[in-house]
Image (cartoon, helix red, strand yellow):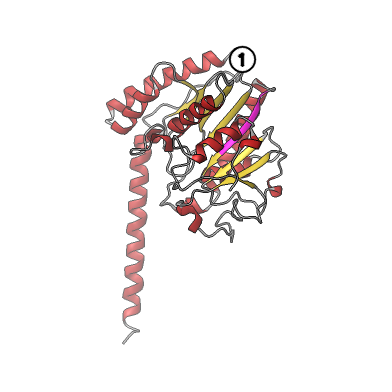
Amino acid sequence: MITPRLPRTRGLSRCLAAVAVVIAIWVTTLGAGRVNMYAKPGALPALSVSTLAARYKANRRAMGAALKTARRIQDFAMARSLTRLMTPGRQFLFFDARGTGRGVEVLGDLAHARRVAILVPGADTTLTTFDVRGSRPYATPGGGARALLGQARRIEPGTNLAVVAWLGYSPPKVTSPGVITDFRADTGAARLRRFVTDVHRLNPSADTTLLCHSYGSVVCGEAVRGLPVNAVAAFGSPGMSASSAAGLGTRARVWAGRGASDWIGMVPHVRVLGLGFGTDPVSPAFGARVFAAGPGGHGDYLRPGSVSLRNLALIALGRDSQVALA
């Protein structure tokens, strides 16, 4: 009989649910305790030409302190990452080792650059993967920014371009429910808006481009309305939380690209009950200018020698007429 089994089934379900909650609380508490061992970032001076050097120096000191903590608590992944980030000559406008970590690196002279490209990474990006992701360093914020700047200098020797690797938010994990909602994107968008506004105040004559990968394109889509940017490029995008490029509310030129082997193309581009991110940015219905991205996969857009890297560099340089279209 089915009836006698129902109470036991409900009881078992409740029991399993309770165990799951306990485990979740335990894991969260354990993680929080570990995370809280890293110091909260100290106050930094407002971004200006006169404070740039001081901010770089303050963040290097903060990294040094975090490295000592990482070694003490045997957080080996963080220790390895911080050792790389502290390589002489690297410049960070912001740093926070707590949680999955945040960091904003500047390549070039941000205060006097004629053009600024801000690289916004997507899901699964943390401070420990800022430079390293398997055998593909170009698939990281730090490595990708270097690949982009290198390509731009090959196209335009002596270019006055500054590139920013902006891990200014905490992206969701690909395997988490958050990757199909804009909860993390909302917070990231607010921070990106403040950052772009600060950069514009620092260097108002520079042309600014947002280069937005994967979930980072959701962040850009929610941040770009009314921002002083000249171009925004979404690549490997699940959507930009808008039904069209016009719906983004920007005068910037909107670009989009997708590699032929990118799995993101199989993701349904819908938005229902707060889930999903809307129209596919490379579709004709969206209305972006679609650039050729070659045969690569989801992490290959900034791979040296790729057509996608060349096109993204051309977009960052404002050489729109030279961008190969899809």
Viewer-proximal residue, 67 or 125?
125
**Picture residue at 31% right of the left edge, 87% below the top:** 1
The residues colored magenta run 206-211
Where 203 sits versus 14, above or below?
Answer: above
Let me know if residue 231 appears in the view.
yes
Q: Is 208 included in the stretch rendered in magenta?
A: yes
* Residue carrying label 1: 49
Viewer-proximal residue, 118 or 235?
235
**Picture residue at 71% right of the left edge, 48% below the top:** 246
Q: Residues within 10 Å of mark 1 (few under 14, many from 20)?
A: few
Where 326 sits versus 82, above or below?
Answer: below
Disc 1 is placed on an element classified as loop
Give the left or right position of residue 273, taking residue 145 as reference.
right
Where 319 sits versus 179, above or below?
Answer: above
Across the whole image, how many numbered discs are drawn on residues?
A: 1
Let me know if residue 104 appears in the view.
no
Mainly helix, strand or loop, the magenta region? strand
Considering every residue shown, the one lying at the far bottom of the view is 1
Q: Is 153 included in the stretch rendered in magenta?
A: no
**Picture residue at 37% right of the left edge, 49% below the top:** 25
Viewer-proximal residue, 12 or 315?
315
Q: Residue 209: x and y, percent? A: 62, 33
Q: Residue 37: x and y, percent? A: 36, 30
**What amino acid is labelled 1 in the image?**
Val
Give the left or right position of residue 115, taking residue 151 as reference.
right
Q: Residue 164: x and y, percent? A: 53, 28
**Picture residue at 48% right of the left edge, 26% below the top:** 150
Give the left or right position of residue 2, taking residue 123 as reference.
left
Viewer-proximal residue, 139 or 98?
139
Q: Residue 315: x and y, percent? A: 60, 35
Where 131 sits versus 233, above or below?
Answer: above
Give the left or right position of residue 241, taking residue 139 as reference.
right
